[in-house]
Image (tube, helix red, strand yellow):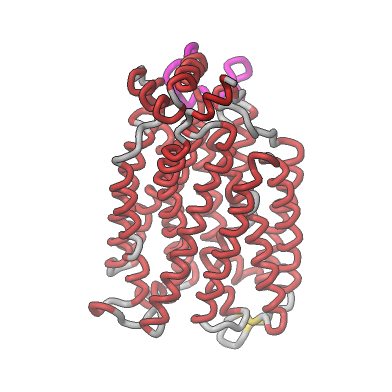
Amino acid sequence: MLKQKSHQDENILLVVLITCIAAIGGFLFGFDSGVINGTIEGLQQAYHSNSVGSGFNVASMLFGCAIGAFFAGRLADKWGRRSILIISAVLFIVSGWGSGIASTSGVFVFFRILGGFAVGAASILSPIYIAEVAPARYRGALATLQQVSILAGLLAAFLSNYILAKMAGSSMAVFWLGFEAWRWMFWVEIIPALLFLFALFFIPESPRFLVAENQNAKARKVLTRLYGLHQGRIKLSEIHGSLLSDHPPSFTDLKSSQTGKLHHVVWVGIGLAALQQLIGINVIFYYGSILWQAAGFSEDNALLINVLTGIVSITACIITMFLIDSWGRKPFLLLGSIGMSMALLLMVYAFSHASLTPSGDWQLGRFGVLALISANAYVFFFNISWGPIMWIMLGEMFPNQIRGSGLAVAGLVQWGANFSVTISFPLLLSLLGLAATYSVYAISALISIAFVFFYVYETKGKELESMSY
């Protein structure tokens, strides 16, 4: 009865509200990642860039993401989760404005890297914050809101790109105030970024950070608001207990004091982070419009297909949100790895029938439909599994002492792999062709099956204070 009463005292509406606010960072993460999809031709024309230059224009943000993710966790341990999220919101605003106004490739890359700092920070801190305020029994569902928000941001970017290109005539056509449509695609981001900045001032700091900083009165107040008086006291005691014998967080904590080697949980985090990108999902998100034009679709229809891909992604993620706390994390990861492997192999088969036109463009002919269906199946299986669950597990699998540092390292690996895959895709495409390039991603998906089966352990229903090395 006492346990039931403590659950009744939870302020679930407040928990959901602050989770949604934190997840706006995920929305901006998705928007900033997806907006580039519709601007590539405009960037090529404006900056006269070749395939390598275009690849760097697309991937430059990811360089900033790796840096932002690496430092965000440690800075959040020092200054607080909310404070760093506020800084990231400001960077989103500046980057959105600067990317659209940039007159040279160098200036554009600078502002995209700046936006990357914000995306990297949000990708790490939103899952940390949500995991640290959400009760364990529905932490998975609430943490999945982060991925839903990322996908909503991607969908919003795809839809915004489509509408602006449709209204202007093309992404390269001059639009409002004498600026090309592709520039306005970047400026749309300023609106949700301003909302994020404003809303962050109304959410509390993470109670686990407050306890670590000996701000016990503030932590007790936050926990009481979230869980009720009785459960708030219990949670405060548990957090104290987990931090009692610990020292200020440090990167050296990632290594075992006995063996001097990285803790097993750190290696698992690195593996999850790397494989999520090595399977090539962001090639679909970043270069989707070019891929579908190769399949024979017009620019207009290619941008519309991106919207369809976004809808498929969100649908898959919502399914996960409702089932993850009953099914667990590992079953979804296995399902996703198997499904992605099959879909990628079908894409490789379709792409093996692609041909080059005299102008150097790829054409899929009648196999374009198979590629389209397989790609959306691939996106579905990714977003029902590795998309949301990798971030969920990184936010909850590390013990309190190394959560910031562990996520910093995993985030650096994740964005580094993202950068490598994204910048290498145009080059691999020109050297190897579509089929061989996607074979690389298919092999990574097959490897992910074995990795999940042998190395990933279940975290469903576990309190953060009970996570072990």
Drawn side of residue 406 relative to residue 324, left or right: left
**Residue 465 in picture, x, y percent from top left:** 55, 22
Outermost residue toward the top in this view: 245
Name the residue: 61% across, 23% down: 468
Name the residue: 27% across, 78% down: 176
Quadrant hosting residue 208: top left
In the displayed structure, 310 sits above or below 150; it is below
Label total for image:
0
* Range of residues picked out in magenta: 243-262
Drawn side of residue 4 relative to residue 161, left or right: right
**Residue 30 in picture, x, y percent from top left:** 46, 56
In the displayed structure, 373 sits above or below 383; it is below
- Verify whether residue 258 appears in magenta: yes
- Verify whether residue 54 appears in magenta: no
Outermost residue toward the left in this view: 177
Name the residue: 58% across, 67% down: 309
Which of 61 and 332 lies nearest the eye of the viewer? 332
Name the residue: 53% across, 42% down: 143
